[in-house]
């Protein structure tokens, strides 16, 4: 079986040629390469790192930050074969229908197409992340196997499901690490070459700026190469996709695809505040599948509370997925409040127990939450990035509205109550964690004034350059991105096949 190529062993200044270049060997790049296996054209996948972590390559990801405290740019992603799937959590959930819709009350919202456009690709994406049968809320069989569901009265919050990636035959119960898991499949693919230690440092356009001519490849501590490609797909993650476009500013002075100053704007993640609320269950028993993921129906599940589509629309709130994190003890005031409430409801609250809730929230799109180039350069001479991070108070307010609704429904069902724990912005930020789900920096929009790529993920104005991954998400939803971005990339694979037909 042929080994992967190593850019360090290719003589400096060699000019290579291919039909399709895929830049980046994370879940997006690898899924695309697998989707194009056997196609009647030559594919070259270029990966910056090797098969394992190394400090010098990882350091290329470093950058600076301003604004709301956020994860370090080289700490929330991994730069070697398999990308950030080498340390992802494996949580999966499809985006909701409303995540694709224009919401009149939410500026910049809406995808150029509806969810049904990518639904056909969900089963294969689900297979690639190895999360078992595609069940979630759609085809879930509500049975005893999934434990009791905490009773909720009628209202705007329902019990939804995460599923989890589990790397087949892996003894350590890890989610799928795309590099290791699919290396042999990629090696077996006759029309594919994978080149490791190949850092793309420039997207070189033809003089008319309408097509990509070639890619500059740099080797750490070594020379440089060129790759001429008929078509190219950037799949470097949402931070690096933007950086490469911005830094390639020799022909288009503002950067490739940045004629309308859109590249790098609208960065987003999923805020994951901890201890957002305390939930008390009067009967004291937390049903299985809430506190931890468990196996049923050939998949791994965890229950979560989600606002319904109708509640989101009517109350103008963003998506959120609330999980039960751990049990907590109530102080004397809390216990008295629970006893009084149980009394008023005419139920027995003596066994009541409390649990801390956490959540993954959707953020509102913000053009000022953005990546820009700095004057500092990395070891390959590429400008480093600065991230300006923001979060709106209204994002927290949306979540509080959803939690109030959950509390109302628990009381209605006489099953429990909710106490909201964070009120001020300072309090929210003090419990903030982040998903490391980088999103939005090359957003998809039919109009080049409002986006970087079109509905086919082609960079506006550059006929043969495409972008894959969650950088193209124009609005984000609250679901974890990876299975969704893979579905979208498989759709891009079909489009690319049609270009060569
Ligand atoms: C700690 C953590 C936990 C996460 N948990 C979850 C989760 O539970 N569920 C979920 O859905 N998502 C999760 N994610 C997010 C998930 O990892 C990403 O959505 C996914 O990895 C994105 O895939 P990608 O291929 O677009 O980008 P990446 O995984 O970032 O891959 C990009 C690839 O491009 C390469 N590259 C970068 N620059 C260059 C260059 N200039 N030239 C050549 N190659 C380059 C990189 O080395 C890398 O291999 C998590 C992320 C982190 C960090």
Image (cartoon, rainbow, N blue to C red):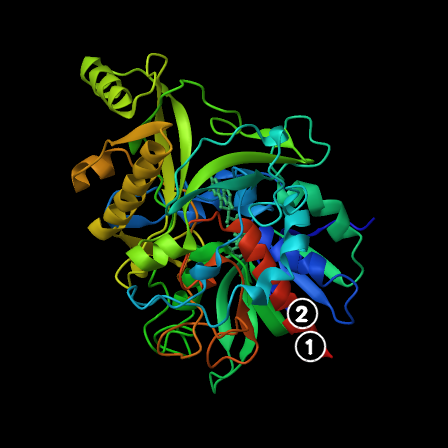
Residue that appears at 32% across and 73% down: 261
- Could you tell me which quadrant the C terminus lies in? bottom right
Residue 342 placement, left or right of 140: left
Residue 252 position within the rendered picture, expressed as x and y whole percent measured from the top left:
39, 78
**Is 318 or 54 nearer to us in this picture?**
318
What residue does disc 1 label? 498
Q: Are marks 2 and 1 in contact (CB under 8 Å)?
A: yes
State the SS at label 2. helix
Residue 192 position within the rendered picture, expressed as x and y whole percent measured from the top left:
74, 60
The relative height of residue 116 versus residue 24 in the rendered view (above or below) is below
**Callout 1: few (<14), some (14-19), or many (20+) C-alpha neighbours within 10 Å?**
few
Residue that appears at 23% across and 34% down: 430
What residue does disc 2 label? 494
**Is 35 or 410 nearer to us in this picture?**
410
- The answer to whether the beta carbon of the residue marked 2 is less than 8 Å from any atom of ligand 1 is no
Residue 284 position within the rendered picture, expressed as x and y whole percent measured from the top left:
40, 18
State the SS at label 1. helix
Residue that appears at 73% across and 52% down: 186
The relative height of residue 325 versus residue 239 in the rendered view (above or below) is above
**Callout 2: few (<14), some (14-19), or many (20+) C-alpha neighbours within 10 Å?**
few
Asked if one can make out residue 198 in the rendered structure from this viewpoint, the answer is no
Picture quarter containing residue 449? bottom left
Hey, which residue is sitting farthest front in the picture? 346
Label placed on residue 204: none
Residue 201 position within the rendered picture, expressed as x and y whole percent measured from the top left:
48, 62
The relative height of residue 218 versus residue 131 in the rendered view (above or below) is below
Residue 392 placement, left or right of 156: left
């Amino acid at each position: 079986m042929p080994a992967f190529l190593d850019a360090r062993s290719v003589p400096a200044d060699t000019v290579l040629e291919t039909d399709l270049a895929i830049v980046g060997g994370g879940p997006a790049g690898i899924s695309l390469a697998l989707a194009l296996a056997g196609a009647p054209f030559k594919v070259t996948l270029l990966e910056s790192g090797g098969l394992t972590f190394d400090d010098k390559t990882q350091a290329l990801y470093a950058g600076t930050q301003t604004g709301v405290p956020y994860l370090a740019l080289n700490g929330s992603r991994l730069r070697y074969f398999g990308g950030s799937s080498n340390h992802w959590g494996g949580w999966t959930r499809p985006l909701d229908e409303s995540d694709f819709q224009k919401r009149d009350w939410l500026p910049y919202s809406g995808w150029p197409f509806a969810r049904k456009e990518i639904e056909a690709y969900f089963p294969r994406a689900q297979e690639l992340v190895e999360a078992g049968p595609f069940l979630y809320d759609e085809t879930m069989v509500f049975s005893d196997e999934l434990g009791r569901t905490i009773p909720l009265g009628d209202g705007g919050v329902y019990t939804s499901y995460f599923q989890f990636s589990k790397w087949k035959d892996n003894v350590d119960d890890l989610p799928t690490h795309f590099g290791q898991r699919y290396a042999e499949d990629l090696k077996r693919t006759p029309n594919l070459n994978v080149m490791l230690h190949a850092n793309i440092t420039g997207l070189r356009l033809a003089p008319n700026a309408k097509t990509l001519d070639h890619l500059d490849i740099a080797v750490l501590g070594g020379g440089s190469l060129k790759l001429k490609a008929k078509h190219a797909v950037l799949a470097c993650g949402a931070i690096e996709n933007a950086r490469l476009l911005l830094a390639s500013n020799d022909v288009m002075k503002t950067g490739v695809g940045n004629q309308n100053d859109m590249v790098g704007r609208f960065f987003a993640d999923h805020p994951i505040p901890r201890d957002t609320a305390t939930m008390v269950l009067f009967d004291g028993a937390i049903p299985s599948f809430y506190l931890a993921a468990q196996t049923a129906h050939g998949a791994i599940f965890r229950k979560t509370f989600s606002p319904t589509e109708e509640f989101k629309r009517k109350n103008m709130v963003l998506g959120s997925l609330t999980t039960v994190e751990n049990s907590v003890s109530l102080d004397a005031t809390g216990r008295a409040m629970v006893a009084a409430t149980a009394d008023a409801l005419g139920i027995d609250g003596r066994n009541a127990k409390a649990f801390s809730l956490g959540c993954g929230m959707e953020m509102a799109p913000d053009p000022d939450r953005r990546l820009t180039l700095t004057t500092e350069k990395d070891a390959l001479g590429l400008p480093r990035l600065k991230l300006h991070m923001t979060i709106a108070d209204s994002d927290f307010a949306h979540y509080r509205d959803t939690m109030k609704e959950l509390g109302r429904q628990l009381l209605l069902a006489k099953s429990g109550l909710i106490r909201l724990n964070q009120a001020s912005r300072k309090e929210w930020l003090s419990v903030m964690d982040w998903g490391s789900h980088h999103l939005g920096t090359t957003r998809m929009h039919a109009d080049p004034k409002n986006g970087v790529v079109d509905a086919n993920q082609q960079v506006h104005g550059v006929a043969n350059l495409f972008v894959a991954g969650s950088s193209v998400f124009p609005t984000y939803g609250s679901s974890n991105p990876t299975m969704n971005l893979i579905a979208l990339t498989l759709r891009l694979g079909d489009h690319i096949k049609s270009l060569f037909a």
